[in-house]
Image (spheres, rainbow, N blue to C red):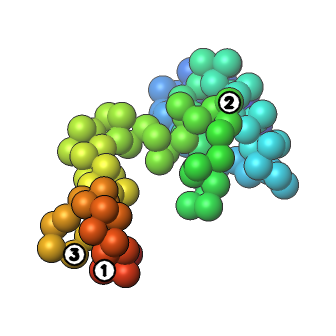
Amino acid sequence: MVQRNLRMEKRDGIKRQILVSAPSNVAVDQLVEKLHKASLNVVRLAAKAREDVASTVDFLCLHNMVPAANPSVAKLLQLKRKPVISRNRTIQSCIESDAGPNLIY
């Protein structure tokens, strides 16, 4: 199917997009890897729960591509990952003052 689409693109000059799925995450990773090796533009969409799971195609995952392409998004994601602490105290100062219950998650 992919080869057929490529031939049609060359013939009429119209770029096409294909949505591909597979029965498991491992199968999707292998498919994405093969398509990438065939010099196709590939973007892998992963479930939120799978974003922290290491993969051989991490660099092709949308959740990694967007922050890499846009520094503003990368900065926002860093801020999002920081824990919010009451009265702007650092985690260390909360631990030192034994103020653990004052942490807001």
Say the numbered circle drawn on residue 34. Answer: none
Where does residue 35 sit, x and y in percent of width and height? 68, 28
Report the residue marked by disc 2. 56
Residue type pointed to by label 2: Thr
Residue 87: give x, y in percent of width and height: 15, 73
Q: Which residue is mark 1?
A: 102
Q: Where 3 falls versus 51 (above or below)?
A: above
Crowd class of label 1 (few under 14; some 14 to 19; many from 20; radius 10 Å)? few
Picture mark count: 3
Q: Residue furthest bottom?
A: 101
Q: Secondary structure at mark 2?
A: loop
Q: Camera-side residue: 101 or 54?
A: 101
Badge 3 local density, few (<14 within 10 Å), some, or many (20+)? some
Residue in the image at 37% along x and 81% along y: 101
Q: The disc labelled 3 sits on which kind of residue?
A: Ser
Q: Are marks 3 and 1 in contact (CB under 8 Å)?
A: yes
